[in-house]
Amino acid sequence: MKSVCRANAYVSEAHGIKNQEALQCSNTMGRKFVVGGNWKMNGTKAQINEILGNLKSGLNADTEVIVGVPAIYLDYVKSQAPANIEVAAQNCYKADKGAFTGEISPLMLKDIGVNWVILGHSERRQIFGESDDLVAEKVAFALSNGLKVIACIGETLEEREGGKTNEVVFRQTQAIANKIKDWTNVVIAYEPVWAIGTGKTATPEQAQEVHKDLRQWMSTNVSGDVASSVRIQYGGSVTGANCKQLASQPDIDGFLVGGASLKPEFVDIVNAKQ
Ligand code: PEP
């Protein structure tokens, strides 16, 4: 099945056909469900022990689980987390070392055994002014240093209401596509900004529509192969209560979870895929 679907995507690409059938077929290609918990600037050692305690049993082995940890606790979480939980930084810079006060580098992350980083989160873009280009440069630099990247994209409420969702999401993805060739170690997190931390989750249909359109866009603008194989997470007020419906959508390959990743219900979210 895998090779047939891949071949379909190639054929449609070769013919310049926007073949949704080929891409939907690709959903059976074995994109492993991947759930990230973004702890943001939360947690003490005592709280981290509790969170990890909740994650020590009951995790579906078919789901890849990654926790995004404040930099100061990365080493601690690495030492405490069970082997089936990966650890991610929430940011890193685009240089190995130097006069960049307050920053950490991919080299440092690798040095302590951290293999993942979340880049381009909307809070980084909005509060810390990170541009599409800077995010893309960071993604490229992190990948070239052997990190795997969760690259976040998503529109604001104003942009959605202005009918610009796809324009924004495609622009942010294009900036990354301009800087990288190999998408093997990239997970895209589609996170509508209006849904982050607001309790206003995108409906499964709204999320699926953007994921499907983005995959289609990637088929045309990156390659059919990447469009079929890249994993796209949804993020924005995912909870134990709404995760199953979202997970049932064909182009949703996992979640990036903020608030609920600090709570016991994170286990239910990890196990959302039936
Ligand atoms: C996030 O921080 O990436 C996020 C999706 O947050 P929340 O789940 O709290 O909306």
Image (tube, rainbow, N blue to C red):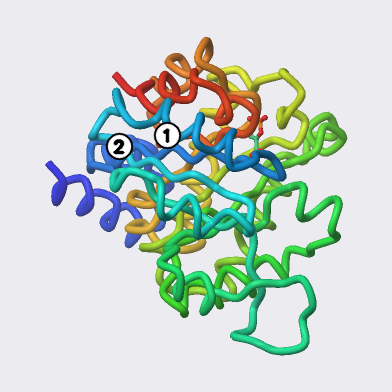
The residue nearer to you, when weighing 220 against 83, is 83
Which class describes the residues within 10 Å of circle 2: few (<14), some (14-19), or many (20+)?
some
Q: Residue at x 41, y 23 (%)?
A: 267
Q: Which residue is mark 2?
A: 27
Mark 1 Cβ and ligand 1 under 8 Å apart: no
Q: Is disc 1 placed on a helix, strand or loop?
A: loop
**Is residue 151 among what the camera can see?**
yes
Of the 4 image quadrants, the one containing the N terminus is top left
Of the 4 image quadrants, the one containing the C terminus is top left
In the image, residue 236 lies at what x, y percent?
64, 30
Residue 208, compared with residue 45, is above or below; it is above
Q: Quadrant of residue 56?
A: top left
Q: Are marks 1 and 2 in contact (CB under 8 Å)?
A: yes
In the image, residue 161 lies at what x, y percent?
83, 29
In the image, residue 96 lies at what x, y percent?
59, 85
Q: Residue at x 68, y 50 (%)?
A: 121
Query: In this image, 168 relative to 244: left or right?
Result: right
| Numbered circle sitting on residue 201 | none
Mark 2 Cβ and ligand 1 under 8 Å apart: no
Q: Earlier in the sequence, mark 1 or mark 2?
A: 2
Q: Residue at x 45, y 63 (%)?
A: 114
Q: Which residue is mark 1?
A: 251
Q: Residue at x 40, y 71 (%)?
A: 182
Q: In terms of image quarters, where does ligand 1 lie? A: top right
Query: In this image, 35 relative to 40: left or right?
Result: left
Q: Is disc 2 placed on a helix, strand or loop?
A: helix
The residue nearer to you, when weighing 159 against 220, is 159
Figure disc tally: 2
Amino acid at pointer 1: Asp
